[in-house]
Amino acid sequence: MEYDKLGGIVPPIVTPVDQNERVDEDGFRRLLRHCVNVGIHAIFVAGTNGETMALTSRERERAIRIALDEVGGEVPVICGAMDCSTRKVIENVKSIEEMGGEVAVITPPFYMKAPSDGEILAHFENVAASTNLKIMLYNIPAFTGSTISNDVLFRAAEIDNVIGYKDSSGNMAAFIKALQHFKGTGFKMFMGITDLAPLALLMGADGFVPTLAPVYYTLYLKLYNAAKAGDFQRVMELYDLVIRSNQVAGFAKNGIAANKYVVSTLGFFEGRPLAPAEEPTQEQKEKMRAFAAEIVRESNEI
C-alpha cells in the first residue's frame, strides 16, 4: 500500500460487538466492505469512536486483524496503538507489526497527570525507535488530558518514521500554523473535528476523520472533492449541511454510543456500545434515525 498517498476521508470506524462484547466479525467485515465500495479513502481502526480503550486487548487485536484482512490490500488501514505508558504502546505496536499493519496511531500517554512536553516527546521518540512501522501522532486532549504542542509536533515530525498528525484539539490557529510549517514536506495533516473540516481542507489539510462517513459518504466526498479542487463557493454551499451532520452525537448522553447507533442503521450490525456506556433510548434512536435520513436526503440533492 502506498501510504505516501494517504489522504481523504478516513473514518475512525466503529467496532461492532455481540452481546458478550466480542467483535462481531461478520458485521464488521460488511461495514468495512461498504466503506471501500462507496469510495471512502482509508480506515482508522481501534480509534476513539472504535471504543478502543473499552475493548479487551484481545478484541482490539481482533478488530485490527479483521480490518487489515478485509480491506488492507485496497485502502490504507491505520491502526490505533494508544495506551497509558510507553511500554504498553510499544507492545501494541509490535502486535500491529505481527498482524501485517503498516501505520500505528499514538497519542501522548494518558492516566498521567499533565505530562510535560519533554515527556510527550520522549514517548514519541521511544515508540518510533522501537519499530519500522510508520507512526501517526494523535492530538485529542479531551480524552488524554494533555495537548501535543506545535513545538513537540515539529520536533517529533523530524523522526524518520513519523509521517502524520491527526488533530482533534479544536485549536484551529495551531492547526493552521502547523499546515504552514509542513507545506510541501509530504507530512500528512488530518482534521479530526468534522465542524472544522471545511476550513482545514481549504487551508491544505490532507483529509479529515469523520465517524459518520459510512452514512454521510456522499456529503463528505462532495466536500473533500470541492476543497481539493479549490472550489470555495462549493465548499460554502456544503458547509451548513456538514455542520448539521455532526450534531447527532448530541442526541444521546454518550456521543460515541450515538454515533455507533447511527452507523448501525445501515443494517450491517447491532449498534451496541461497550459497557459502561449507556445505549440511546428508543426515543433517541428514532430521532437519530430520522435526522440521519434527512441529512442523507439533503446530501443527495445539494
Image (cartoon, rainbow, N blue to C red):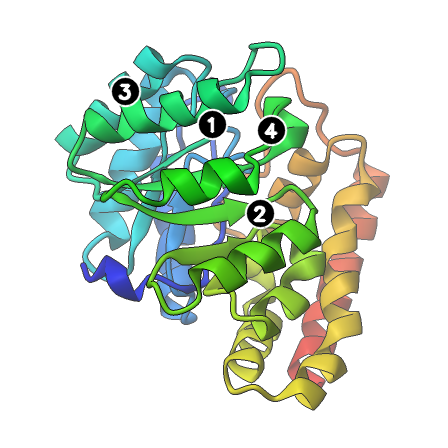
Q: Which residue is drawn at 61% across and 41% down?
A: 260
Quick one: 257 or 112, which is closer to the camera? 112
Frontmost of labels 1 and 2 is 1
Where, by quadrant of the figure, is residue 68 drawn?
Answer: top left
> Badge 1: few (under 14), some or many (20 or more) residues near its Cα, within 10 Å?
many
Amino acid bearing label 4: Pro
Q: In the rendered view, does 292 fall on the left or right side of 210?
A: right
Q: Is residue 195 above or below residue 183?
A: above
Q: Name the residue under label 1.
A: 52
Residue nearest the viewer, comparing 23 with 61 = 61
Percent across and percent down for residue 148 are: 55, 34
Residue type of the residue flagged with mark 2 = Ser
Per the image, the residue denoted by label 3 is: 90
Q: Nearer the viewer, residue 288 or 191?
A: 191
Q: Is residue 33 left or right of residue 255?
A: left
Q: Nearer the viewer, mark 1 or mark 4?
A: 1
Q: Which mark is residue 264?
A: 2
Q: Residues within 10 Å of mark 3 (few under 14, many from 20)?
A: many
Query: Residue shown at 68%/77% (left/top)?
Result: 299
Q: Which amino acid does label 1 sit on?
A: Thr
Earlier in the chain: of badge 1 and badge 4, it is 1
